[in-house]
Amino acid sequence: MSLLAPLAAPAAAGTLINATWLDYLLVALYFVFVLGIGFIARRSVSDSIDFFLSGRSLPAWVTGLAFISANLGAVEIMGMSANGAQIGLPTVHYFWVGAIPAMLFLGVVMMPFYYGSKVRSVPEFMLRRFGTGAHLVNAISFALAQLLIAGVNLYLLGSIVHALLGWPLWVALLVAAAIVLSYITLGGLSAAIYNEVLQFFVIVASLLPLTLIGLHRVGGWSGLQDKITAFASSAPAKAAVAPAGQQLHSWPGQALSGFSSGFLSVIGIVFGLGFVLSFGYWTTNFVEVQRAMASKSISAARKTPIIGAFPKMFVPFIVILPGMISAVLVKEMVQLKSGGTPPGGASGQGVKYNDALLLLMRDVLPNGLLGLAIAGLLAAFMAGMAANISAFNTVFSYDLWQRYLRKDHSDDYYLRIGRLATVAATIIAIFTASIASSFSNIMDYLQTLFGFFNAPLFATFILGMFWKRMTPAAGWIGLASGTVSAVVVAFLSKDAFGTASLGVLPLSGQGASFVAASTAFVVDIVVSYAVSLATEPKPASELRGLVYSETPREDLVDPEEASHPWFQRTMPLAGIALVLVLILNFAF
């Protein structure tokens, strides 16, 4: 599917969602607040550190909520609800296995290195540890990834505007991009972060009623189980619907992994998703790390992902459950899951699993609550896109432009470059949105991208942080080799990357992304180890603050944290979060 068709299409005669003036008023008020925050934040931007890192001045609770809100975009809202509709409860693995452990590891182990080294970005950390080669590979791959993922958020944001107003998709994309561009260009990272805090509360307030009303319509949790069981037993053969047991139990998760063997499914989820993809994303993705680096102290930076872990573990109840409800309650979703091709959808070119949440909103929410839900979806997509754009402009300005193209200019010059990069990234995202539009389930596309960019980066990071013998040459050669191997596996898999896939390997969907990511990790480790043995490492004196064994403990902790109450200290908070997520895994 392409955006070229909507470019030539007239405005839709009708809309997917029947909103009233009250719904539009709530959405308009939300946009007033968003742009107002951008204007207010502009007053605090006096130099490039203010624009790119909020002057390193924000408290932990603000950066913690922004940390989770930056991720609560298209992946969480549309992608996870689409997964809930398509495969059911195993989707929780993206949260309880594929997020929380890595977030706690980031806060406890890795943030002291990031924050203590005073780097301005993750690629800059790579520069100090491995030198120019690894830095350039990481900076370019990260910038490319953010442009592609920003396109995902923008496409879904434009789809909501299209569904609400009936505008052609290209008009919706331009309007949505202009709004995000306005407040990021005005206030930089501070505008993005404070809007993300606002957006977090708007998202929860909008999706919680949808979940509760939807559950009431299907007769509660037991009624939902009965309907999924009945549907799975009566579905036609062409639908390829997973058995009810696989949809209603998180383990062994075959509906998610795509493996017929329960044992292989568990291995794939634990290693491919829970270790490689998860740790690769949460511990090395500058979109998330940037929020923690904006904190006012090393203690606040460490607590940022840990504070974010508490709301993160309960997000499945407001994004996955609505998808599961939509699959048995909304007639178009029932037809789609039965193997049909119902017309319409947010794009106007056929219903997809990505439409599960929108169609459920249409069917169950009264006016007023509908407007709030629409504002929540817009908030989620803007939070995600703003996070991608604000991370991109930092890496482009500092790690590419300043480092390799225009050195030793004034701070005002780099501040202007950052704002121009914001404009350019937003324009490019309009075009990368066309790639996202070709996927029925956006999670397939996103997990493939994470396998390309995050999995090999995590391998390089973790080996370089705990093995001082790893050399600068191994840093960039291992990273490049891992990335190439993930791309090869994806293109050889069945439908792992849309129509470009060759289908040689018997892997498809998200299971293919797990294998691609695992391959990237293993290849990166093996190549890095071999190259390190054949090349010269850095002297130990240059590794302080970069390698665990060469960094004194006092460099990794905030001496004032010991005087804080226990509930404000890093380790007790991390321990509580870990216990809670273990309870959730056993409960389901």
Image: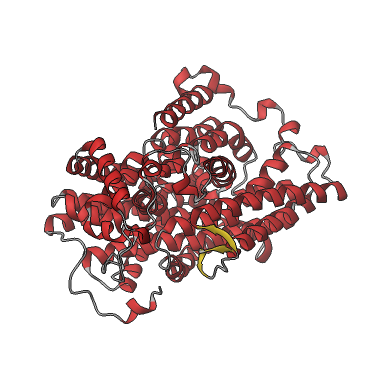
x and y percent of residue 527 in the render? 76, 52
Q: Quadrant of residue 279?
A: top right
x and y percent of residue 581 in the render? 45, 30
x and y percent of residue 86 in the render? 37, 53
Say whether residue 33 is visible: no
Residue at figure coordinates x 31%, y 61% from the top left = 336
Left or right of residue 424: residue 483: right
Exactly how many numbered labels are in the figure? 0
In-front residue for pair 199/118: 199
Identify the residue at the far bottom of this view. 8
Which quarter of the figure is the C terminus placed in?
A: top left
In-front residue for pair 500/174: 500
Left or right of residue 381: residue 575: right
Residue at figure coordinates x 42%, y 58% from the top left = 442
Residue at figure coordinates x 87%, y 50% from the top left = 534
Say whether residue 426 is visible: yes
Which quarter of the figure is the N terminus placed in?
A: bottom left
In-front residue for pair 157/177: 157
The type of colouring in the image is secondary structure
Left or right of residue 380: residue 496: right
x and y percent of residue 484 in the render? 67, 61
